[in-house]
Amino acid sequence: MRKSYTILLALVVLLSTAMSVQALESKTIERYNGESASADWYETNGDITTYTYLSVTETKDGTDIYISTYTYGPCSWSEKSGYMFTNDNVFKIDKKLNSASLSEVEIEVCDYYTGETGTLTVQADWIGEGEISESSSKSSSKYDDYVWKSSDSSKYRDASATGSINGYDLGVSSYASLSSFKYAYMSMTK
């Protein structure tokens, strides 16, 4: 009887050890690195004002491009925006945030008010200005057997941008920036 109890106890210990090892394997780690550039343009012709915003973000997965244009005046109002994702090599950015360029791309846009769709051919170039700002942060939490940690760091630099839409020169941007980022996330259940 004592021998069977000892064997049973040994089996329970082995099983709980195996379960602990399996539980420790419940771990998720994710990392995201990338670079981005954005710019705003304002233009006023008489009583008509046009605002254009362009954003480009590149990661290992590919390049996200977003554009929006707002035109408003006493008798007209239009708001068009569009987004595209591509794996083509259309965006280049210097690692030191000195410059960036977006090759000519065609983005399908939709008018928010009318629902009409169209295509905009967009191109832009950025030149970094001033000093590079850097920031970083870390955070963690623990609840019972669950542990969560994250860290991120980024670099940012003001810039000036020039660009065109459908061959129309947008001139020099009102505001523009270049940035790079790194993000890491880990979660584990013990």
Image: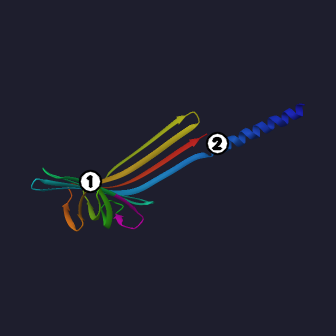
Image coordinates for residue 11, horizontal then vertical, percent:
79, 39
Amino acid type, mark 1: Thr
* Magenta-tinted stretch: 83-93
| Outermost residue to the top | 1
Q: Residue at x 67, y 44 (%)?
A: 21
The crowd level at tag 1 (other Cα within 10 Å; few <14, some 14-19, many 20+) is: few
Horizontal and vertical percent position of residue 147: 54, 39
Label 2 sits on residue: 23
The residue that disc 1 covers is 114
Decide which of tag 1 and tag 2 comes sooner along the chain.
Answer: 2
Question: Where, by quadrant of the figure, is residue 39 drawn?
Answer: bottom left
Alpha carbons under labels 1 and 2: distance apart: 54 Å
Q: Does the stretch in magenta take in 92?
A: yes
Judged by depth in the image, the label closer to the viewer, 1 or 2, is: 1
Q: Tag on residue 42?
A: none
Q: Amino acid at mark 2?
A: Ala
The reply to whether residue 55 is visible in this rendering is no
Q: Would you say residue 154 sits in the magenta stretch?
A: no
| Mark 1, secondary structure of its residue | loop
Q: Residues within 10 Å of mark 2 (few under 14, many from 20)?
A: some
Looking at the image, residue 110 lies above or below residue 149:
below
Residue 16 is situated, as x and y percent measured from the top left of the image, at 72, 38
Name which residue lies at 67% across and 40% down. Answer: 20
Q: Nearer the viewer, residue 29 or 39?
A: 39
